[in-house]
Image (cartoon, rainbow, N blue to C red):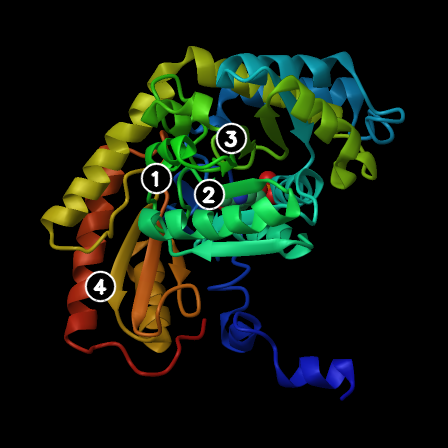
Amino acid sequence: MDIFERIAANRGPLGSHSHYAHGYFTFPKLEGEVNPRMIFRGKEVLTWSLNNYLGLANHPEVRKVDAEAAAEFGMAVPMGARIMSGNSNYHEKLEADLADFIKKPDVLLLNFGYQGVVSIIDALVSRHDVIVYDAESHACIIDGVRLHQGKRFVYPHNDMASLEKQLERAKRMTDETGGGILVITEGVFGMSGNLGKLREVVALKEKFEFRLFVDDAHGFGTMGETGAGTGEFLGVQDGIDIYFSTFAKSMASIGAFVGGPESVIEYLRYNMRSQIFAKSLPMPLTVGAIKRLELLRTQPELKENLWTVVRALQSGLREKGFNIGTTESPVTPVLLNGQIPDATQLTFDLRENYGIFCSIVVYPVVPKDVIMLRLIPTASHTLEDVKQTIAAFEAVAAKLDKGLYSKQPATA
Ligand SMILES: Cc1ncc(COP(=O)(O)O)c(C=O)c1O
């Protein structure tokens, strides 16, 4: 079959909805300053879909440094990959600051989180090694694992008994091949808000020899006393061998980093294909990240404000009988029963009639009869925003229960 014909016949699980969803449910345009209140199709909405956890996107000091760095350096500098001609004192300072903050001996900056994780996994393992990973891992982990030429074993999400079984299998295999074992999980799972069971995973190091790689995209800046992440929160930062986070969430920017022992980071510096064969992180993003990290470290009230909103939102939703799953982090899923047409009608109603904008997650990410509305609280939201949102959710959930939404997908 011709490739283009197959693509025309099968648009993929998300693409199959594009004919009615595009521009509204998918690829919506939020305009105006990054804030809880933004403009969607000409109307103001209260938005809960931006990973701007600490509100740094619009912090005056951040905006000032971003603008000054863009004026001073432009977007082109530094030219080239870091290994060739794209290194700078700023890149090295940011790495040193991050290493100091996450309490790891060394850190390597990455241009993007997604391709960074794929490439870290690719660089770390050889075909004699075995990867053991959580089934609900982010797509970048799954894609990194796909590149692995050796064995990989998956365990059901956070199922420690199964992880132990997979480690036994992995050990039998590596005893034969002479390879090692890499366990991969997340600090905070971005859909459910669950924490990875890092204490339990680290405890398994007493029984098995393995290295632990944690993607803490949603935990960095939001979890732990200083904001250093889920490892700090659970008291097991030392047990995490390779710690990763992106700048795309709490840092409200682009870029990412990986921290670990000096020898391993040095190895990644010289062996990660996504960094060696790609241009360096532009200077404004690097200088801007130094400022963001400084604010993250010196303004604990940002994280405190975030958690005040998180607690009010999550306890308020639970009190009204909403199922928000088992989240232990700011990520707040609201799980309703219904099919995709109900989900679109309800989301349309929420946006158009209640002015609430949140992300809608449907099959295949969640089971067929589940609608997940995903709320991301930030330090910039207010308790008034929380009240307005819970009231709107009560109203639309009541309509859903009464079957008032039509069985056709909503179209804008
Ligand atoms: C768990 C996790 N890992 C990695 C990434 C990718 O990071 P980036 O946006 O920097 O590519 C994301 C999303 O942004 C994520 O949620």
Query: Mark 4, mark 1: which one is toward the viewer?
Result: 1
Query: Mark 1, mark 3: which one is toward the viewer?
Result: 1
Question: Mark 1, residues whose alpha carbon is within 10 Å: few (<14), some, or many (≥20)?
Answer: some
The residue that label 4 is drawn on is 396
Where 120 falls versus 167 (above or below)? above
Please tell me how many numbered marks the rendered image carries.
4
Toward the viewer: 318 or 347?
A: 318
Amino acid at pointer 3:
Ala
Toward the viewer: 215 or 153?
A: 153
- CA distance separating discs 4 and 1: 34 Å
Query: Is label 3 in contact with label 4 (beta carbons under 8 Å)?
Result: no
Question: Mark 4, residues whose alpha carbon is within 10 Å: few (<14), some, or many (≥20)?
Answer: many
N-terminal-most mark, 1 or 2: 2
User: Residue at coordinates 89% horizontally, 27% vertically from top-left?
Assistant: 84
Amino acid at pointer 1:
Lys
N-terminal-most mark, 3 or 4: 3
Residue 197 disc label: 1
- CA distance separating discs 1 and 2: 9 Å
Where 388 falls versus 253 (above or below)? below
Residue 118 x %, y %: 65, 46
Residue 57 disc label: 3
User: Residue at coordinates 47% horizontally, 31% vertically from top-left?
Assistant: 250
Query: Is label 1 in contact with label 2 (beta carbons under 8 Å)?
Result: yes
